[in-house]
Image (tube, rainbow, N blue to C red):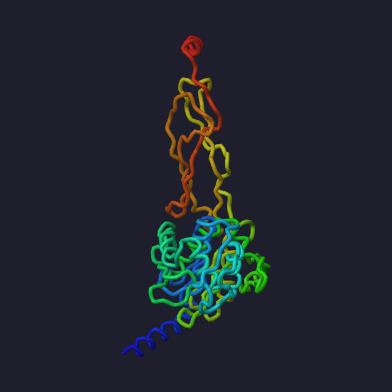
Amino acid sequence: MKKAKYIVILLIILLSSSIVYGDNIVLSSSSSILIDSNTGRVLYEKNPYIKMPMASTTKIMTALVALEYGKLDDEVTIDKEAVGVEGSSIYLREGEKITLEDLLYGLMLRSGNDAAVAIAIHIADSVGNFVDLMNKKAKEIGAENTNFTNPHGLHDDNHYTTAYDLALITREAFKHEIFAKIVGAKSYVSNRVENNYYYNKNKTLWEYKGGDGVKTGYTMRSGRCLVSSATRNNHRLIAVSLNASDWFNDNYKLLDYGFDNYKPYLIYDKGQFIKKIDLEKGKKKYLDLVTDSSFTYLLKEDERERLKISIEVPDIVEAPIEKGTKIGHIYAFLDGKLINKSDLIASSSVRKTNIIERLFEVFKGK
């Protein structure tokens, strides 16, 4: 009975590898997604919510948690539990002292499973405690269909994610500049005496224009898993493919699709004037409202006319008003769906007039 079940699963995977999905992208993966790292917009998807093993792409979350709870110059003393871990290794020795930074490079470039365990024990005193932090972080960022049982990705039936969740995790990790620096490094020389040269296994950095990350992964059960990123015109795209026999080409097709079909458009700039509203009891009769931040969004050419802007502000406000005070909001919609909300703020400070000044204004108006 078990054998029949595996045959059915294999047939599904083989059939799915030859299916053409929207916009004629042929992918070998069982599950894929392409997102804009800046906004999180999903640009392309194929079975993105199926729970699947992720192999060493797990280490993206390991690095993220380590960066949030540790310091790069932390000195880590290697525990015996981190020595001789199965699979990829940076060959740590018990009692060896190494910085967290060196461990992170070994984790992401050489995919060291021993580095993952060493990081976990350093950050949370035990692998189990660290896994709890990983799962807590996953839930915080909305990766609801993800569960970690270890920090390295060696197979466990209860260790899984989805292409969508893995993209969310990667996007969150990129909010740390040092993460981008680490995964974008083609090589790294650590301060260790031995086994100190780390060469990045991710060919995206060499083969794809603008390629700047992220992580490979493979086990017999997961198949080939790959998270790739590339940046052009100051916009980073993140491509995820799970169980993909042609993993790098799959991600390159996804990235090509994104860069060829979507362009960044400045919807509104920081400090841009939006509306003038009435002002009571102030030295001015009107108050100018401006945006407190800029908003750029990736759009297809035919989507530009379907993007709508609306504002929500009071008809009148009363002085005094400090520059930068939040007065209202500006909303951006695409096809009726909210894609961004920003604050509208006072462009200048306006003091409240005194009784004499207000009486003068009354007489002047007669």
| Total numbered badges shown on the rendered structure | 0
Q: Is residue 27 visible?
A: no
Identity of the residue drawn at 45% across and 37% down: 328
61 or 126: nearer the viewer: 126
Residue 152 sits above or below residue 334 on the image: below
Q: Quadrant of residue 263?
A: bottom right
357 or 88: nearer the viewer: 88
Is residue 312 rendered to the left or right of residue 105? left
**Residue 252 image offset from top left, x and y in percent:** 59, 72
Residue 277 sits above or below residue 8 on the image: above
Residue 138 sits above or below residue 153 on the image: above
**Residue 337 image offset from top left, x and y in percent:** 43, 53
267 or 53: nearer the viewer: 53
Identity of the residue drawn at 61% across and 74% down: 201
Q: Is residue 87 visible?
A: yes
Tell me the quarter of the image containing the N terminus: bottom left
**Residue 245 image offset from top left, x and y in percent:** 53, 81
**Residue 336 image offset from top left, x and y in percent:** 42, 52
